Amino acid sequence: MYKVFINEVPVFLTEKNNELTGFSSVKYQELDFVNMCLEIQQNPDAKINVICDNLENDWCNFLLNFEVRRAAGGVVKNTNDEILWIYRFDTWDLPKGHIEKGESKEVAAVREVEEECQVSGLIIDKELETTYHVFKHKGVLVMKVTYWFAMRTNIENQTLVPQLEEGITQVVFKTVEESKKCLENTYGNIKLLLEQLL
């Protein structure tokens, strides 16, 4: 299954015989991409399940509708098992950013977390689910593919500094309970990622 958010509307691609409850279904072969985007604009509460005969082939073809950009980031915990959050554009988010040319996704994830939060001593524990988010930029539909990693830092009492030039106004470690409250004001793909971890 591929879980994509287009303007916060879930568009999930699944194998046939795996229809999702509460979603309107359309077969990939019958998918009119332009009409789907119009439906999303008119109905921001829509949930769309795209049924695929061959998930991997259909996914590759689906990606042709977008300019694909790759990013990496981290779900960072400290020694108190608190999660690192950033606050940007009036929304709680996790630190992440663009993968530079020639850079591995692991190196990019650590670099971006360090740059956005000024946190140090990061150790990657494991790779998490990849998220997919679509947005329009200068008239082009962009698919942001973000690779996520579970990270930790054992350095206590760090002074966290938000990267203001990236629009980040707060950087803070939050408890599990506080993090659950952040889910009320975050993006669909972040919710999806963290609901499995909290």
Image (cartoon, rainbow, N blue to C red):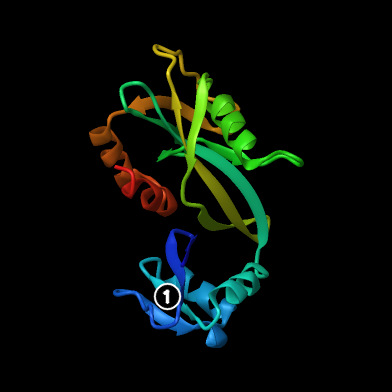
User: What is the secondary structure assignment of the residue under circle 1?
Assistant: strand
Which of 72/160 is in front? 72
Q: Is residue 179 above or below residue 14?
A: above
Left of 73 or right of it: where is 67? Answer: right
Q: Quadrant of the C terminus?
A: top left
Front residue of this view, candidates 153 and 7 = 153
95 shown above or below 159 = below
Indicate the position of residue 106 as horizontal and vertical percent values. 60, 38
Mark 1 closeness class: few <14, some 14–19, many ≥20 residues within 10 Å: many
Residue placed at 40% from the left, 66% from the top? 44
Quadrant of the rendered image containing residue 153: top left
Give the quadrant of residue 8.
bottom left
Which residue: 30% across, 46% down? 184
Reply above or below: 120 against 61.
above
Residue at 52% from the left image edge and 57% from the top image edge: 132
* Tally of numbered discs: 1
Q: Where is mark 1, residue-wise?
A: 49
Residue 71 vs residue 169: left or right? Answer: right
Position of residue 30 measured from the top left corner of the image (x, y, whole percent):
54, 88
Residue 39, x across and y down, in percent: 47, 75
Query: Which residue appears at 44% of the width and 72% of the height?
Result: 42
Q: Nearer the viewer, residue 167 or 173?
A: 173
Is residue 164 among the parts visible in the rendering? no
Task: Residue at the far front: name it.
Answer: 125
- Give the residue at the far bottom of this rendering: 30
Q: Can I make out residue 130 in this image? A: yes
Furthest residue toward left: 177
Residue 73 position, x and y percent, is 53, 39
Identity, as a three-letter code, of the amino acid under mark 1: Asn
